Amino acid sequence: MNQISEVVTTLIHYNVAVRDTLEYCLRKDSYDARLFSEKKRSVIVEVDQHTPLKDIIDRSGENGEKLEKLIRDFYAEVYGDESTILKLADDGVRVDHNQHLAIYKYVLPIHENITNMIQGVLNDGHQKNLDVADVEKCFMAEEAMYRGVAFMTLVSDLNKLFEEYNQARREAEGKETPASNFIGQDISTVIQNINFVRSNAKVTNQVYKNMEDKIVALMENMTGRRDLPAGKRFPDVTRETAETISLYVRDAEAAFRAIYGPTIQALLDQVKADDEARARGETPVAAGSANDIPTEDKKA
């Protein structure tokens, strides 16, 4: 594994930790306390220590400073000891499901920033005629899974908010109220988040696009820009959309896991080989650091 592949693998690993935070936007009976602690550690350690991510951030000027602040704010507000969103208790991880928007506020832009970094590093590898095919496949597998997981959580929240909005309007005999207006603002924010995820997607295959098309149709149904399909009601459309997303995530996760494990193992093997080379007084095969890799500054 060459140096660029090592850097890309560490960045993919970080994006996985960021992506997995979306688990807390899914309503579950319980959440694994051990995995919570690992995600909490992973989110902050990459900017607290000398890592490829920290090296790139430090070389990215104002954009790097913005991204590091976003990551540190993410850690403090979502994972920190004073967080009101996630809290580790004796009975497991407690999640305030009324604060999903705060999680999206950090996860979505951070993941996109790291994705842009990865693309910059891969482009440099291509220019140097290095073999980065394996890590590029892993990157695209993570990218595909991330889009599905993001849509799964966002569309679930959209459906819930839409039901609450209609309920508030029914209780007010069809009139707008402060309650319905507040819910409407949250619906608008979720739709903006969905469009943000869509606009940055790198996946173009038909399976992904079919899911995306269904989500767009659902949003247009809700906002009055598209009629419901003949003979169908809102529950039918929301159920079909959720089923499409679930099937997509199932397949994307299987594909991701099949390549992610071997990629991480290859990184660990390379690190071990480099350490052994240093112990013998030799120059490691993947010598150097992320400072040697020019990447474009990306906006945080």
Image (tube, helix red, strand yellow):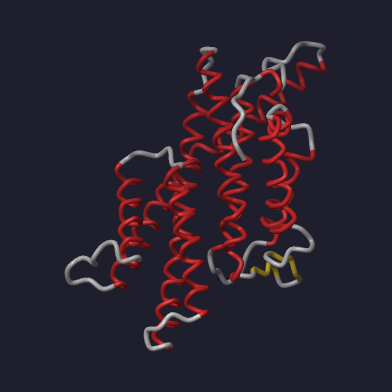
Residue 107, position in %: x, y?
59, 51
In depth, the one of 116 and 40 nearer the eye is 116
Q: Quadrant of the N terminus?
A: top right
Residue 256, position in %: x, y?
48, 42
Q: Quadrant of residue 152?
A: bottom left
Q: From what the image shows, is residue 166 above or below residue 292?
A: below
Which residue corresponds to the image point at 38% horizontal and 56% vertical from the top-left? 245
Q: Quadrant of residue 69?
A: top right
Which residue corresponds to the image point at 34% horizontal and 67% vertical from the top-left? 222
Describe residue 290's horizontal placement relative to residue 27 as left or right: right
In depth, the one of 282 and 219 nearer the eye is 219
In depth, the one of 204 and 173 nearer the eye is 173
Residue 130, position in %: x, y?
54, 15
Residue 104, position in %: x, y?
57, 56
Q: Quadrant of the C terminus?
A: top right
Q: From what the image shows, is residue 112 above or below residue 101?
A: above
Describe residue 200's horizontal placement relative to residue 81 as left or right: left
